[in-house]
Structures are given as C-alpha cells and as structure tokens.
Image (tube, grey):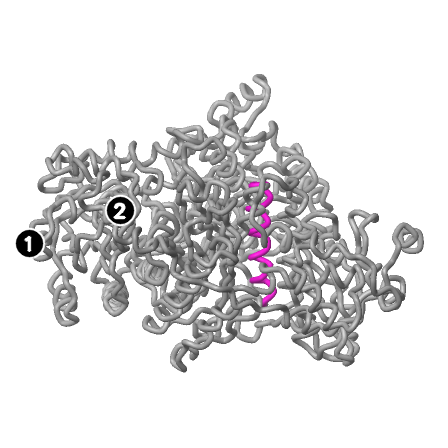
Amino acid sequence: MTELPLIGEAVAVAAEPRLAGARIGVVTFPGTLDDRDAARAVRLAGATAVELWHGDTEIGDVDAVVIPGGFSYGDYLRAGAIARFAPLMSKIIDAANSDAKLPVLGICNGFQILTESHLLPGSMIKNDHLKFLCRDQVLRVENANTAWTLDYQAGQEITIPLKNQDGQYIADEKTLDALEAEGRVVFRYVGFNPNGSRRDIAGISNAAGNVVGLMPHPEHAVEPGFGPESLDGVGGSDTDGLGFFTSVLNKIVGGDK
Amino acid sequence: MTTETSKKFNIDTVENAAKTPDTELPWAELGLKQNEFDEIVKVLGRRPTGAELAMYSVMWSEHCSYKSSKNHLRQFGQKVTEEMKKDMLVGIGENAGVTNLGDGWAVTFKIESHNSPSFVEPYQGAATGIGGIVRDIISMGARPVAVMDPLRFGAIDHPDTARVMHGAVAGIGGYGNSLGLPNIGGEMVFDSVYQGNPLVNALAVGVMRHEDIRLANASGKGNKVVLFGARTGGDGIGGASVLASESFDDTKPSKRPAVQVGDPFAEKVLIECCLELFKGSLVEGIQDLGAAGISCATSELASNGDGGMQVELTSVLLRDPTLTPGEILMSESQERMMAVVTPENVEAFEAVMDKWAVEYSWLGEVTDTGRLIITWEGDVIVDVDPRTVAHDGPVYDRPYARPEWQDAVQADTFTGSVQDAGRPAAPAELAAAVTELVASPNMCSKAWITNQYDRYVGGNTSMAFPDDAGVVRVDEESGLGVALATDANGRYTYLDPYHGAQLALAEAYRNVATAGAIPMAVSDCLNFGSPEDPDVMWQLAEAIRGLSDACMVLGIPVTGGNVSLYNQTGTTPIHPSPVVAVLGKLDDVARRTPSGWREDGQAIYMLGTTGAELDGSEWANMRGHLGGQPPKVDLEAERALGEILINASRDGMIDSAHDLSEGGLAAALVESSLRYGVGARIALQDVMDRDGVDLFTALFSESQGRAVVGVPRSEEVRFTDMCTARGFAHTRIGVVDAASGKLEINGVDALSLDVLREAHEGTLPKYFG
C-alpha cells in the first residue's frame, strides 16, 4: 500500500523520459540567490540543469537559459544594472535575438537584468510601499503562447511566491499600450497589486515570445510540501510554477505532449 | 605606502613600552577596570603597548570574556550525561555547537545578541547581528540554511519604538534576504522594560557532512595566516567593550561610531567562497571576525592551535589608511574571515579568492613559540601569550542575593487584585476578551514583520512562521530535516528566574515537538541587566541553574550560546530574558505538523490539564498587572507530551497541533482557526469539570504542558488509546467546522473568523504603517 503524504499532493509531477535530454542553463552572478532553486525546478520538470557562470564567455550546449533571482552585485547601483555587463550576458542577448531564438526566463532579479539588457522594455523601481514583501501572489496568465507559458491556459490563475524590494514595473504609456496591444503582458497580478506595478503587470515577453521576465518566483512553486499551499495554506497546489519549466521543455523537445 | 602611513603614528613598540613604564594609558576609556589593567601589567611583566592594551581591552570585555557569567555557565558543561553527549559532535566553546543528524549529516546552530548596536543604530545593528551569527555558522564548515530573530522592543505606542522596529526589521530583512537565507520564525514582544534596551537576538542554523566540520585553530608551524573578505575600516571600534559591556547613559557621547556597518553582498560572496574552500579542503583552521575583530581571531586561532603566530599588521588591507594599529586590532568591520592555509594550498586558495573576486592578504604564519607576535613594519608592537588574551581573562564571582522585593512581587497575585476587577464572565464579555487578547501587541499577528522576510529562498522551507516551529529540509533524497523554535518569557523570569528560564526551555521544546520533531539540542541567549547589581546577578545565576537543571531532565544539551549583560537604562534593568532555542530532528519533513486545522469534521483534542494560573499571563499583562508566581513547571509532563506529539505525527494520527503558551487556550484556538481560515465548535465543560476551573480560566490560564491537536476521525481511537496508555490527560473539546466561518465556544458569543482576523492582523499595521 502506498502511504499518502500528509502534505502536498499525493502524486508529484512524473517527469517524462523524453524531456531528460533537454539542457537548461541557470546563470549565477555574485549575489544570485535562487540559482539552486531554479536548477531544482529544472530537474523536477525532467530536464538537466547546467550551471552557467557570469564570467563565462560561451553559453555552451544549452537549449534555454534561466536567469534566477537574488541581488546581483548587491543591487547597490540599480537592480540588474551591473549584471547586464557580464561577459555571459552579451552571449545570452545575442542568442535570444538570433534566429534560433534561445528561450530565456528572467525571474525577479533576472527580470531586472533583462530590462537592463534591453531584451525587455520598461524597468523596475522600489515597491510603492517601500518595503521588502514576501507573499503568495495570484497571477493571471494573459498569454499562453510564449516559450515559458505553453502549458498554461490563457486566463488561468496560478499562485506562486513573490518576494522583492524593487518590484514596481514601470514604463511610459506608449510602451505599456504597445505591450498590451501585442499581447506581451504575460502575467498580471490578481486581487492585489503588491508593488504598484503599472497596469498590474507582473511579467512580460519580447515580441517573439522567447524571452519572458516576471517578478514572482515560479521556481518556488514546483514541489509538493515546499510551495505556497504547504507553507501558507493558500488553497490550490504547491506546484503552480512547474508549468514554466515543462512549457519550455515541451517546446524544446517538440511534438505533442 | 606603508612607510608613509607609519610616519603618521607614534608607534608604541614593545621595546618602547619596556623603557617607558610610567606612560599614561587610556585603559579606563577602553572599558578596563584598575584591577584588570594591573593584571595585564602583571601578565606581561611590563606595561602593555597601545596595541596590546587595545587587544586586552576588547578580549577581556564582558561581551568577549564572559567574566561575570563564566562561573555559572560551567553548569551547562557539568550537568550533562553521557546519553546527552552521544549526538554532540562539537560542544560549547567553538564558534557554534555541532549535532549529529545521522546519515552522515550534521547540524550547527547558535543564537546571539546584537542588542546595544540595534538600539543605537537599529538597521545596521540588526543587519550585522545576522551577519555575525551567519559567519559563526560558516566557520564551522557548514552551509547556512536558515535564520530566526527573537525581538523584544519597548511599548508599542512609545514614539521611539517605531524607530527601532522599522530599523531592526528592515535591517534583518535587508541583510538576511540578500544572503539567500530563509527567515523561518522568531518572536516579537513589546514591553516598556525594553524601551531603552531592545533585544535583537539572531539565530542561524547550518548543515554539513561530518567530514566537513572545521574548527578555529591555527596548527602546523609554517602554515600561512590569511585575512580575507571586506577591508578593515573604522567601524565598530570597541563595539564589544565600550558598547556591549556597559549600560547606556545619557551623559556620555553617542556610541554610534561603535556600531558596525554591514554589506550583505560581501557576506553572500564570502559564504560561497568559504564553501568552495571547504569543498577543496583548502583551509586548516578558520575563524570569523566578529566582536574584537583581529584581536579575537589571532589570539583565539593561536591559543587553540600550536600556540604561536606571527603577524605583520601593515599587511591588513584597509578602507581607511589613517587607522592606527590599535584601531586595526579592535575594528569590528564586517564580512571578514581569517584562515590558516598550508603553503601547498596557497595557490589553490588564491584561485578561489580570484574566482569570487574576494580580496585577501597574507598576514603571517603559524609558529611554535607559544607567543602571538604582531609587528608594524617589522617593529614588534604585540608580544603576548595568546591564551592570556583569549582564555585567561579575569573571572568574577560577582556577589548576588535574592532581591528584597522578590517576596512582595510573588505575593501579589492577579486573582483578586485591583486589575482583576470586572473579570469577563458573560458570553459577550468573554467574546470581547478573546478578541482583545488576539489583537494585543504581544499576541497579534506578526505578519507585518515576517512578510518583510524571505521564507522561500533555498527551496527547503517546509514550515515557517506562524507555525510553532520553523522546519527546513536538510537532505532532498530522504527528507531528513530540522525544526527550530525560540522562546522566552521575561515576565515569568522576573517573577521567578529559576522556573522562568525552565519555562522558556519547556516552551521551545514543546514547540519543536508540536511540529513533530525530536528535540536534540539547545542554544541560549541570556539577556540580562548589569551583573554588578546583586539583584540582576541573582536573576542570572538562578536562570542558568534552572536552565541547566531542566536540560538534564529533558535530556538535551546546551551546545552554545551567548550572554548579553548591561541591558539596563540607568539603574533599571530589563526583565531577565533568557531566550532559549531548541533544535529538533525530523526523519522526513513531509511528516511535520502545522498549527492549523483544515479538514471538516476532524476531532479537536486538548492535551494536558489546566490550573488557575493567570500570574504573569498575557491577560494580566493586558490589565497592567505583574506579580505572583509563574505557571508551574513539570518537565516530566513536557517530555510525555512531546513523545505523544512526535509519535502522533510520525504515525499520521494528527493533522494539526498547536502548543498552549502565552494567551492560553483562547489564543491557541484562534490561531489554529485563522491559520487556514477554518472554524471550529468548541465545548470546554469536560475540561472545566475535570480541572475545577471556570470558563474564563480555561481560556486564559497559561498552564504549561498543553497542546490542542486536530485528529482525523479514523485515527481517534488509536490516538486516545495512545494517550491513555501513557497516562496523559486528553479531552475531546470540539470539532472542526469548515463551513461556519466562525469559532464557536460554548458560553462565549460566536466569533466570526473575519472579525478575529481583522483584530489579529490589524495591530502592527496600525502602529507601524
């Protein structure tokens, strides 16, 4: 008899063998914090996580890249402002803009680095309430056609942790209008705007949909027993964030699920 | 560069000191007493140089030498059985104790104070408190995995409390969040006794494989001594001596320059860099630089090793080139480590430093002379036996006596007092009382604080605030993990220091067991007033005696901790506040028990019995009364309760458990309901009949050794059989009601969970925005 765990779902997501060959790079800068978590998420989704060092001059053999959260270089100047100049970043920028359209996901500080790199428009400033805030955040998936959201339904609501100090997304009205018109607002805060972000924007993509950045942390909602449901009892599941990683893997491997 | 620098100073060499015995030295300004200075002269056989005086003054300070508490602290090492030692891999005396978790895993944890700096400069004081305790954990060879912060501030409505609160919480978050360490719990108490002396304690826990344990010693003649991390600056000079070891006094100048300034980014890089050094076995001994800076690191490394070290002080990388040798020795600049490296490993060591872009400088080497020799451009400015600096400081048998006022305080019970007039009895009054309780400063939701801390980072947090204990997974394969709780009740300890300290231990023990973990080890942070006051000294002596006795009964050893004295303003000390941290082990964190119930129809049981124990309670506190005797301590009952909770968790007999402590059953019922927003129907008649108490007492008494648990219907027989077999009092007091949205207690007007939540969560935002 299989004993049911007391917490989390009875069945963890069963990784599909066909995904195991996919390689996802996870970048570490000095001050990166959630790199091991992002690597764990990649593994739980069924792929191989590859450590990438900010000083590397080649991306190497990876099929996608995650730029995880943290405080690169302490964020003392402006979040992400120094990290964008890392040797590896110029390679990532080139690969993301190339015809191959390398899928890139920037989470939290990673999102800030992507805007500083001009892979994504706009910028992040300090939360409107001026405090660091850690909470379980409901998001609506507005665009389920990006490389990182294929496994979600448009309009689907997911709950994943949010934790940052500089999470207020801003851009000029023209840019915001363009993002809306082009369907590049990928995630929106639902119920509560935790930081004053314009138009409740939690995450956006580039025009091609291969580069996605968001402030909340999908890699902290990938494992039964360690996500928002188990920690805070928000209802729903502990694994709402896993779809980011399975989305990109399915895209890489191709074909029907 | 160095030649230019040295010209600015009149360097007081050992040679010069020997020739000029009558030179006046500022020993009093550095916090030394006449007898202590005389002792230094005796030890050296001459007057100390300026640099030596600086070293002795910080290392012989109360903060570093434990001179007032040492004679009492010995009990923690004496009252230990072989059984208690079996899992202790490293005991008291190192940077932190280490406990065996099995499967080759070890855990190290420690709690420390950063009280005085956090009052003077709350943000930096609290931030560097985290930084310091985390470096202690790294020094043991461990990867830090979580932090916790027990906090005690002045009255919630005092204007200065907001300054300290905002600064300290932002500092803890700003530093801890930037290190990638989840903050998994702590405490928050408001009491005017802490107005001028807030308590900011910090706990860190780290894990390692057995083979990775590192100790602070410098062995092997010819091995190189290296200082790495941040540069040395002028911050925190004399932090341990003039700041942490004296009472505050309005007549003296601000002590702000004695507070260190933190750089969490530097510390995060330092953590990763040290872990890489450990992985490559590149260091022989390692020591963090905290209180007393280079003075402490060199003298402790040398005296714990082969006993000799030679250091050239001009090799220290400086942020401020104008620092004098004494200042360099005393500086408490943060994010620095000192290590001992074999000549063969020098190159590999430097490669790791370069990879992480960490600055380092080679200061000297280990010798077998038994002397710590520090030179300034080759001139000897320190020539001491390092033991005399690090270990053989003064020890005082401070006079102590039971205060004259203690009897009067203990005779002044709450029941029947002026403040007890109009005790709630009618259903509406009791409902109002419960609501008032859970909105009170000490019982309200601490989410305003904990939402400023990252509880997710690391991906191993299995349970965090507001559950009874924080739980972190250690081994991703097996699910092996640890649970941690910290507790103290200054009011109980004020009423009876011996039993008050035991109650702090009992509560932390109970919290860990409530989470389903087996308690294994203790770390304590003893926050008290001035040891020069015999009343305070008696409180300290009694608390240590009580705590060490209780550890024996519960069978868990103290593996480390810290003493913080002089927490007083003028002649008014804080309540004696021994903060006790207990660490427990879970074979699989998936088995941890949360504090709230969720499943409709589950039975709610209360474990333990209730007496009329309102003295020192939150209810009495809310009514402005403090007197009488604290709740009775029954450590055997705590142990029995703990075993029931642990077994029930392991065998899946309970789905929720919450310990009863401050605020009694009323607080526990509300918290268990609000945890997941699921109500309950409660009837306490059986408890009242059995224990001979009225409804008010059943709800607000703070009798110990109690918990409420949620039991699935299918497990009820098995659970009650277990309690009966163990002879432990258990009463079915109600049932979970998922649909009602209310907490309904017979004899109390129904309490809407929405109203309770608003009351519970509204308090801190109301005062702090």
- Disc 2 packing (10 Å; few <14; some 14–19; many ≥20): many
Q: Is residue B449 left or right of residue B14?
A: left
B417 or B181: which is nearer to us? B417
Same chain? Circles 1 and 2: yes
B678 or B389: which is nearer to us? B389
* N-terminal-most mark, 1 or 2: 2
Residue A179: percent from left, percent from top: 54, 24
Q: Is residue A70 left or right of residue B31?
A: left
Does residue B360 sit above or below A199 in this rendering?
below
- Could you tell me which secondary element the residue under label 1 belongs to? helix
Instruction: Single out the residue that lies furthest toward the front.
Output: B404
Q: Examine the rendering and report whether any part of residue A215 can be seen.
A: no
- Point out which mark residue B689 bears: 1
Identity of the residue drawn at 83% across and 65% down: B21
- Could you tell me which secondary element the residue under label 2 belongs to? loop
Identity of the residue drawn at 9% across and 54% down: B692
- Point out which mark residue B400 bears: none
Residue B273: percent from left, percent from top: 66, 59
Give the letter of the chain under mark 2: B
B732 or A58: which is nearer to us? B732
Q: Is residue B293 left or right of residue A179?
A: right
Looking at the rendering, the stretch of residues picked out in magenta corresponds to B121-140
Kind of residue sitting beneath label 1: Asp
The residue labelled by disc 2 is: B663
Kind of residue sitting beneath label 2: Gly
Q: Main secondary structure of the magenta part?
A: helix
Which quadrant of the structure image shows residue B27? bottom right
Is A141 within the magenta?
no
Count of numbered circles on the image: 2
Q: How many angstroms separate mark 1 from mark 2 (CA)?
A: 21 Å
Q: Is residue B61 left or right of residue B750?
A: right
Is B132 within the magenta?
yes
